[in-house]
Image (cartoon, rainbow, N blue to C red):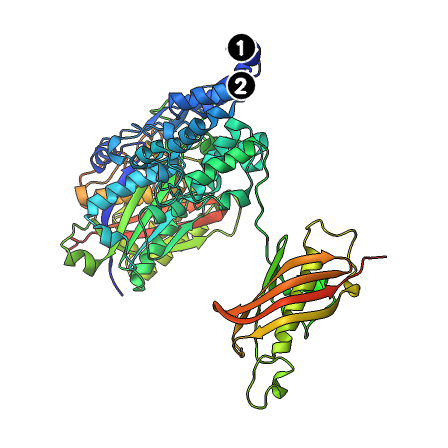
Amino acid sequence: MPEVVVTGLGFITSIGNSKGAVTGNLRDLKHGFERYEPFQNEDIPVKLTGTIKDFDTSSNEGEDWIYPQKYKVKREFLRSLSPHGLYANCALVQAIEDAGWTEEDISHPRTGLYTASSGSARGIHYHLGIMEKRGVLRCSPMGVISSIAGTLNFNLVSRFQIQGSSCGFVSACASSGHALGFACDEIMRGRQDRMIVVGAEDGNLESILPFAGMRALSLSDDPDTASKPFDVHRKGFVGTGGAVAMLLESGSAARERGSRIYAEFVGWGQGSDGHHAAQSHPEGKGMVLAIENALRETGLASEEVDYINAHAPSTLTGDISEIRALKKVFGGCQNPPAISSTKALTGHGLSLSSIMEAGFCMLAFEEDFLPGSAHIEKLDPEAESLNIIRQSQERSPKVILSNSSGFGGANVALLFRSVNAN
Amino acid sequence: MNADKDMLLSPEAESQLRESLKRCSPETVKAALAYRRDRDTEHVPVLVIGIIERFLEIEYREKIREGKDGLLLVEDLGIDSLMMVEIVILIEETLGVSIQNEELLELSTLGDVKSLIYRKMHGIPTPRKPQPISMEEIESIVPIQRPFLFLEEATVQTEETTGWYRIRGDEFFFPGHFKEEPVFPASIMIEALGQLAVLHLLKSDNGFLEGKIDPNKIFFTSCDGVRCHRVCKPGDVLDLDVRLKQVRYPLANFEGKISTVGQKVAYAQSLSLTFGYVD
């Protein structure tokens, strides 16, 4: 079975729009939260988001958006993008440059593209508003392709002239984990040699605020403590948007062209809670299955995992489920793996979160460090037996596990291994 | 400027118009405001060009400013179908006209756009392209039915009706016409032209009739000047055409032609039908 490796990364995130900035902030535990202007209204109890710096996508018209000049796109492409479509384009341009893929590599029958996003709630709301106000035939012809779930695919596949497999994945906060997993399978099964995976979210009022109705958001207005996964006093997550692109390649193709390799994508597993539409299983049933399936498929032992990037969004039930799942799988390990949740710094990126965190894991391999779990003042007693690292550590990880959970109890576990392992 | 005419454009309407046109050139905005005040169609060409220009990529803008009618929207200006819709929506909003999907499909040059807008401004209806009707629909109009209907599809216009028939090979007369050599009978070709003429009488709206024709009161009376040029066999497609020459109750006279892949097959100088009105 072909080996799958990661050769390109691109980041547009609340903690930086380049590999260098993201690495620095992860190492130094610097968060990306700010007071988000549209929330500064007394009727809105939520105040913070993980903001995307150097971008202003607040207008409903793409032509008003401000974004770094180097990513300048033609109107022809811009007109059918929602904010996360723009972020995704920028992240993908970065990743392609990072991997050194040529135009022929990208637009090739052996290169596919998988995406994950929930669509653009704001776009849908805006365009339906125009339909009601001005009439059906006055709707923008871009209304549908710029906003429904799938918008990322439509736009990126056409813009980058993709010829191989293409599909969008929707499993809420596990979406980009599924996209990565199935992209990995596509190469392992020999169907494709290269896969582009992109996760993105608008991260604006319309995509984040509805979670307040579920009482899932942190209402804190202190950016330094608002998101604190594994803390006993955690009160919900801070929302964020942005985009991360990751380029996967068969090991032979990558080595043939002498590419830098971040890590091997060894395999993945999934498992479902079969329990509740919104809440995770209290014992982390589906998460345990996902991790066990990933370990079995890759032939790795739990003992071999030295770092886990947890899903832990800083919600009461979400964190507990994962804590229990991790205790169940890794409780007997002689050298328990280091664990952290980088959502303490970035916020929860929803469909974006899984690939964002997998991207951070690549930086950990590349830069030889483990990002710490920030903002824990008092650790949840349930997590005391776990090796949750509060500070970043200068260590070269060999095997990393990255977890994600989505609504409906969908769980994804991704396993990566250093290519300098021995 | 006349102060009364200024009243036509409320401050809200003006600011909404300015907002919609915010990415257009100052001349375009000026022309739009002037048009909304005085409804003078003189302003329309500048306005239409200005609105199209606003949507074009920079490399095409120079071309549109020349404003040549022959400019091709897709090839010369890089306008795709979705951009055309964006352009139309803004034109509709600015001029207060409304453009239908079918009208959009017929636009291929800048001149087409200008003349469509001109017709809209002056309330001149767009000539409608006649739509072909299917065999099933033809059967619902004429009393002739399968297996004796030799029209697969037909398009009825004011003075002419065209249609086609693909010779299948399993028509009931082939075993006898001729022995081991299927040739489409010339008499059936004339029959097919007659059927097209019946359809024309029942379906075209040319204003010559004094009442509604009864489908069961149409009969063949005569056919003159018939010439056949080549034989047709299974697999051939007959392109049929009848043109109305004269109507004088109770007679209608047509000229008929059949061709296949552009070659003459048969010609009938005169084909007459009698008809009667519904009682």
Q: Earlier in the sequence, mark 2 or mark 1?
A: 1
The furthest residue to the right? B279
Which labelled disc corresponds to residue B38?
2
Specify the subunit that label 1 lies on: B
Which residue in the structure is indicated by mark 1?
B2
Amino acid type, residue under disc 2 in the picture: Asp
Work out whether residue A324 can be spotted.
no
Going 61% across and 79% down the picture, which residue do you hit? B185
In this view, A173 is above or below A60:
below
Report the front residue among A231 and B201.
Answer: B201
Amino acid type, residue under disc 1 in the picture: Asn
Going 25% across and 44% down the picture, which residue do you hit? A95
Going 73% across and 69% down the picture, which residue do you hit? B220
| Residue B219 in picture, x, y percent from top left | 75, 68
The furthest residue to the bottom? B179
Q: Are marks 2 and 1 in contact (CB under 8 Å)?
A: yes
- Rounded to the nearest angstrom, the CA distance separating label 2 from label 1 is 9 Å
Report the front residue among A45 and B141.
Answer: B141
Report the front residue among B225 and B158.
Answer: B225
| Residue A356 in picture, x, y percent from top left | 32, 41
In this view, B189 is above or below B120:
below
Work out whether residue B175 can be spotted.
yes
Specify the subunit that label 2 lies on: B
In this view, A34 is above or below A148:
above
The furthest residue to the top? B3
